[in-house]
Amino acid sequence: MNAPPATPIYMRDGADPVFGLLHMPADDPGRIATAVLICPPFGWDDICSYRSRRDWAEDLTAAGYAVLRIDLPGTGDSGGSASDPARLPAWTAAVTSAASRLRLTTGCSRVAAIGISLGGLVICRAIAEGAPIDEVVLWGVPSRGHSFVRELRVFAHLEDSKFDGPNDTVGELESSPLPDGYTGAGGFVLSTQTTQALDELDVSTLTLPPDLVSRALLLERDGIAVDARLRASFEQVGATVTVADGTGYGAMMAKPHLARPPLAVFALVKSWLQQSLPSATELPEEATGSDHLDTGHPTTIELTVGDTRIHETPLTVEQPFGDLFGVLAEPVDGPSADICVVLLNAGAIRRVGPNRMWVEAARRWAALGVPTLRLDLEGIGDADGDSSRFSELAELYVPERVDQVGAALDALEARGVGSRYVLAGLCSGAHWSFHGALEDKRVPAALMLNPRTLFWNPSQQIARDFRRGLLRRSAWRRALRGEVPLAWMFALAVRAPFVVVRRELTRWYTRRSGKDELDQALDRLLGTNKSVHFIFSGNEPLYEEFKLEGRLGRMNRWPNVSLELIPKQDHTLRPIEAQRAAHQALDRALDDELRRTPAPSSSGSSVGVVD
């Protein structure tokens, strides 16, 4: 059974609006016994598991449950920043509000909350403060917030050694550590106050209301036992506690293009939920008729950025395979620029962008008068389509994705949002931006962060693996430690030399014949007065190829092309100083574009540069 599309909703009971997606079953939505709230993990785990949580919601909805997925304040599409103070109380209030909203909206008799990692800790705190939650499913949840913070710090320590690179003092920006007491890992940061509050959070010391939570399902984490103190906390208040296998946690937390939904856990949780379903005759009166349902949800939310009001609106773009999904940020007061920016997915990362950078940029630019859409393309985030196909990297570079970008521009044009569209993205999103500029006359510029390739060829990936794998001692050490499969190294050793030789001969021929594909593309962009902005971190393969091919020495051939280096050698910009530098570079590039072809309504104003 196919469930209807999810409905975007906003809740604003606190300072920061909470974004959610409500999935309602197709059959008799007025007779829902149990509704489910899914509360996400934090940071990189949130990014990796997002599509699996969407799959989980759709699986439960197909079984007859209403499901609400939320982004906690300061994360995802919700308001605020994760580095703001007092996040733990804001998160707790958001869960309480979401549970109440779910009960009111669906008229259900019970609310079950699913919490993963930090999301589970927040659910426990919300229950202690009176959140109307009857059952809980907690997966990989510690009893102490200190355990979560310690895990983040270990993760951060492992990351630090990977990031130093040749561009660490590029321009005016020097490397700088996080402020004292802050915790940062995977590109995400928590303030001193929030870190301290989490350090002090202990479920065993919370006053859980007796008999409020009737049942708890505690899931192991790929063989790691459930926290005994967490189990005891629920048993002490009379809850029936079930402990079960949670195999699949690691697969769900793999890199977004490789992450896989834990189908066995989906089935387990459905079976557990069904064990307490009341019969239709036991449902309360408000749950037996759709006339009682609260269907009023705001479809636009207003935010304040600095002293400027903006609003954000979710939108969909119909396609043959289903819908694309996006969030459009626009100024509330004053004119909008004739230029609209469209931020594209970084690989399989959803529309919030790498480290939530697209949310920050979109809101900043909207406050300065530039409407900005952050977009999910097919199979990514909340766009329809098959996400499993991305295990083959080539699927991120298929021409159909450029067509989908064009469809999004058509939708914006039909809404009267701009007539020219600057495309921006990281990695494959940069690739789509480049080709959108090549193919669509409405696109005057492409802003490209760390593009891996501009013309996809499978031999490119093999050649790069050969250079970055077999030719590096560190790769062999990792293989000997079991971190890289020896079979992969052997297969690469057999295949790669032939591919590398063939590719180098092809490149030699194209240089000799003057038929270099990239040179020709840049010539076309120059001829149509379109600008291209490259922004590279250290050690990026495409930048290294530019150097090896001598293209850097020929850049004066294309005055429409700029190239900027930013600190650290991390492809997805996890170090905070790399994010800051990338924001500044993007602001400068957009400012250049606004000044180059100012629209009358924007009065030639600049976007400024983020601090």
Image (spheres, grey):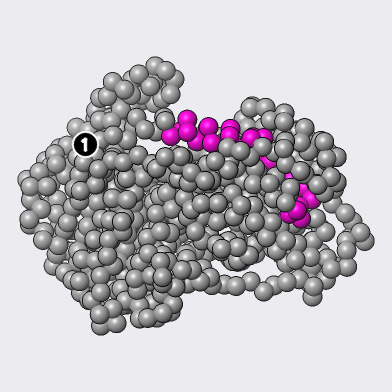
Decide if residue 263 is on the left or right side of residue 490. right
Residue 457 x %, y %: 29, 45
Could you tell me which secondary element the residue under label 1 belongs to? loop
User: Residue placed farthest to the right in the image?
Assistant: 281
Q: Split into 4 quadrants, where in the image is the C terminus?
A: bottom left
Over which residues does the magenta segment extend?
Answer: 130-156
Residue at figure coordinates x 42%, y 30% from the top left: 157
Q: Which residue is mark 1?
A: 166
Rendered view: 549 above or below 340: above
Residue 385 x %, y %: 52, 56
Residue 170 x %, y %: 20, 44
Residue 404 x %, y %: 40, 64
User: Residue placed farthest to the top in the image?
Assistant: 480
Decide if residue 445 is on the left or right side of residue 139. left
Q: Tell me, yes or no, whether the highlighted magenta stretch contains residue 133.
A: yes
Q: Which one is in front, 1 or 555?
A: 555
